[in-house]
């Protein structure tokens, strides 16, 4: 008898750029080395030229899902979204505070909904608790939105923010069925010291309880792992960003792990 098929692993948050980060090839190396099958290419903030991530996705059919950015302040932003969707975009990256130019501040969100694009959403924890973001959730209940970095702006490790009860308020948004949550490596939850302290897995000291709280609130079917490559290379490194949270959550069982580290993202981004 043959071996049972291995569950697909999907990295739902990667960046590439020949101008700012790295081109696609180093990411492919990390994926092959760590058994990651697919990745979502998230456009970096400030870059509205999406050709590089679209071309990389076309060069490796079925391997990547591109998530683009548009300038919401541009009156033609919704037209740009149509063009990018036609070019293969699977999603659009917006900030929780993003408002469109013109009379309808939710126009760009509505256009994503009309085009069948998911939204990868960045912001501070407070941004997700504003009336504006709540209006997005209330008015567009079928628009799939994933909150990045466990609801922390850019995933900058402070070691402080999660001690505040505001994170508990964020988890209450799990009552919105179209809202998902993305988590990254444990190195996002703990500042990296100036030198190695001798611990074999220093980032295991991160506030793992918050990650477990998040899974309890949203469930594995609405949470997805993403490495945050290549910034993760300056924290714990790609392999640890995958292995440490996977080991931390292993008590949930194989089915939950398969969803958290591949199944949810595969469904969210329509990866075959």
Image (spheres, grey):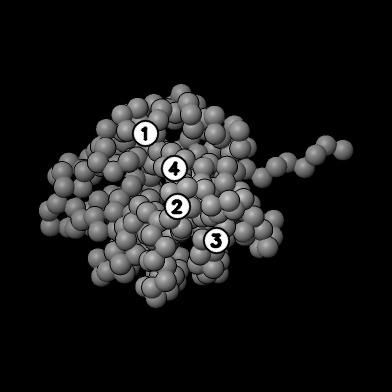
Residue at x 57% of width, y 57% of height: 204
183 vs 262, left or right, is left
Q: Nearer the viewer, residue 59 or 27?
A: 27
- Residue placed under numbered mark 3 in the picture: 205
166 vs 48, left or right, is right
Of marks 1 and 3, which one's residue comes earlier in the chain?
1
Q: Nearer the viewer, residue 34 or 196?
A: 196
Disc 1 residue crowd, few under 14, some 14–19, many 20+, Cα 10 Å? few
Q: Quadrant of residue 156?
A: bottom left
Residue 232 coordinates in the image, percent (x, y)? 46, 44
Determine if residue 271 is in view.
no
CA gap, disc 1 and disc 3: 28 Å
* The furthest residue to the right: 1
- Secondary element type, mark 3: helix
Residue at x 69% of width, y 60% of height: 253
- Residue placed under numbered mark 1 in the picture: 21
Disc 4 residue crowd, few under 14, some 14–19, many 20+, Cα 10 Å? few
CA gap, disc 1 and disc 4: 12 Å
Q: In the picture, which quadrant includes the N terminus?
A: top right
Residue 193 coordinates in the image, percent (x, y)? 45, 52
- Residue placed under numbered mark 2 in the picture: 193
209 vs 78, left or right, is right
Residue at x 24% of width, y 55% of height: 98
Of marks 1 and 4, which one's residue comes earlier in the chain?
1
Of marks 2 and 1, which one's residue comes earlier in the chain?
1
CA gap, disc 4 and disc 2: 11 Å
């Amino acid at each position: 008898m043959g071996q049972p098929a291995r569950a697909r692993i999907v990295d739902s948050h990667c960046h590439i750029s020949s101008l700012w980060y790295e081109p696609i090839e180093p990411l492919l190396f990390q994926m092959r080395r760590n058994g990651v099958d697919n990745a979502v290419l998230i456009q970096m903030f400030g870059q509205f030229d999406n050709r590089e991530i679209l071309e990389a996705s076309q060069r490796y059919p079925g391997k990547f899902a591109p998530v683009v950015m548009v300038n919401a302040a541009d009156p033609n932003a919704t037209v740009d979204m149509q063009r990018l969707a036609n070019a293969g975009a699977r999603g659009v990256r917006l900030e929780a505070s993003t408002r469109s130019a013109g009379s309808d501040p939710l126009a760009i969100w509505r256009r994503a909904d009309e085009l069948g694009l998911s939204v990868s959403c960045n912001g501070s924890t407070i941004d997700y608790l504003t009336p504006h973001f709540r209006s997005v959730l209330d008015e567009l209940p079928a628009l799939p939105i994933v909150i990045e970095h466990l609801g922390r702006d850019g995933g900058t490790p402070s070691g402080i923010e999660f001690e505040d009860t505001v994170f508990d308020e964020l988890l209450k948004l799990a009552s919105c069925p179209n809202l998902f949550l993305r988590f990254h490596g444990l190195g996002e939850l703990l500042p990296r010291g100036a030198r190695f302290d001798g611990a074999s897995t220093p980032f295991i000291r991160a506030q793992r309880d918050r990650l477990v709280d998040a899974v309890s609130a949203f469930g594995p079917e609405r949470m997805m792992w993403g490495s945050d490559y290549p910034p993760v290379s300056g924290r714990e490194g790609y392999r640890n960003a995958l292995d440490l949270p996977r080991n931390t959550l292993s008590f949930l069982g194989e089915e939950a792990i398969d969803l958290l580290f591949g199944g949810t993202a595969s469904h969210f981004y329509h990866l075959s």
